[in-house]
Amino acid sequence: MDTPLDNEALNIAAWHLREARRVVVFTGAGVSAESGIPTFRDDGGFWTEFPPEIYATWKGILRAAAKEPRRLAAFVHAVIAPIAAAEPNAGHHAIAEIGRHKPVTVITQNIDRLHQLAGSTRVLEIHGSMYEVVSLNGQKTKRTLTQSQLKRIAERLRRAKYGALSLARLLVAIRPIAGIGVTGAHRPNLVLFGDSLAEPDWSDALKAAKECDCLLTVGTSGLVLPAALIPAYAKDAGANVTTIDPGEGGGDIWLRGTAGDVLPRLVERAFE
Ligand code: OAD
């Protein structure tokens, strides 16, 4: 973790970034870790407390709601509260800065909207967004939430976690994001295990990966398919691939370190 950043590797990655005509930045939970949002699979990650066998499918979540409303309130709170409180970190800002020099497509697996808040303009959210509420079948956007609305829901859930919580009270607490209203049932626009990826974002992401000549992959374990194929598609189409991650190498160049530390240095070196 404390290995110094390889200066030569940084120079080469910066050269590729500077020379690129089209850039893709592919991000996972690690890019938001320094904004206070836990990753999934690192020590103490999200799936440690909430096993994906239960919490990564809609069926599992519904079963948990009926059986253990208080535990489900804790789960929804654990998802929403860090996102509601988060601000973009230096890594998100550096990615937005690349967009001031080059055409950039950000392909993110994250649902936290932090790339947009940092100023990135073309962001493809292939696993959906915590800020969008859609019809039950995911076909229609019902409404877009604000960060303060998410904060209010998180606060209600925090209180619910400690009180005597019935399923009915839980349903009231989460009604703005999930439930049944006068216009039918609604849920957050999230891609869970077994779901198709969000469209048109996924098709656009594949196209962008195949057309870019430089891809930065940031803060992802690369374990979840099909999203994890994005760097390989870019590589096969001839792009240079640089990985920025403290724990996971791969691609042509590995800049070992955190997004908030490495990305500003890379961007400064490329465009100074
Ligand atoms: P993971 O938790 O699997 O991986 C996080 C990655 O971020 C690891 O490679 C860490 O080494 C790295 N990391 C940790 N801190 C970092 C930092 N400060 N800067 C940069 N990198 C850091 O998260 P994802 O790869 O995003 O999908 O997970 C992919 C998908 O699995 C998620 O979108 C979610 C999950 O199940 C669904 O739920 C569909």
Image (cartoon, rainbow, N blue to C red):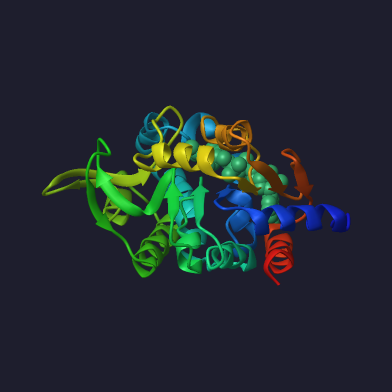
Q: Is residue 3 left or right of residue 183?
A: right
The image position of residue 268, as x and y in percent, is 70, 69
Residue beneath the point at 37% across and 51% down: 165
Depth check: 83 or 218 in front? 218
Report x, y in % for residue 123.
Answer: 45, 54
- Report whether 244 appears left or right of 97: right
Q: Residue visible at 48% across and 68% down?
A: 119
In which image quadrant can residue 199 be found? top left
Residue 27, compared with residue 159, is above or below; it is above
For the residue pair 171 and 234, the one nearer the viewer reads as 234
Relative height, residue 19 to residue 51 (above, below) = below
Q: Above or below — where is 127 with respect to 270?
A: above
Q: Quadrant of the C terminus?
A: bottom right
Q: Nearer the viewer, residue 223 or 272?
A: 272
Q: Residue furthest left?
A: 182
Q: Considering only vertical position in the picture, is 90 above or below 218? A: below
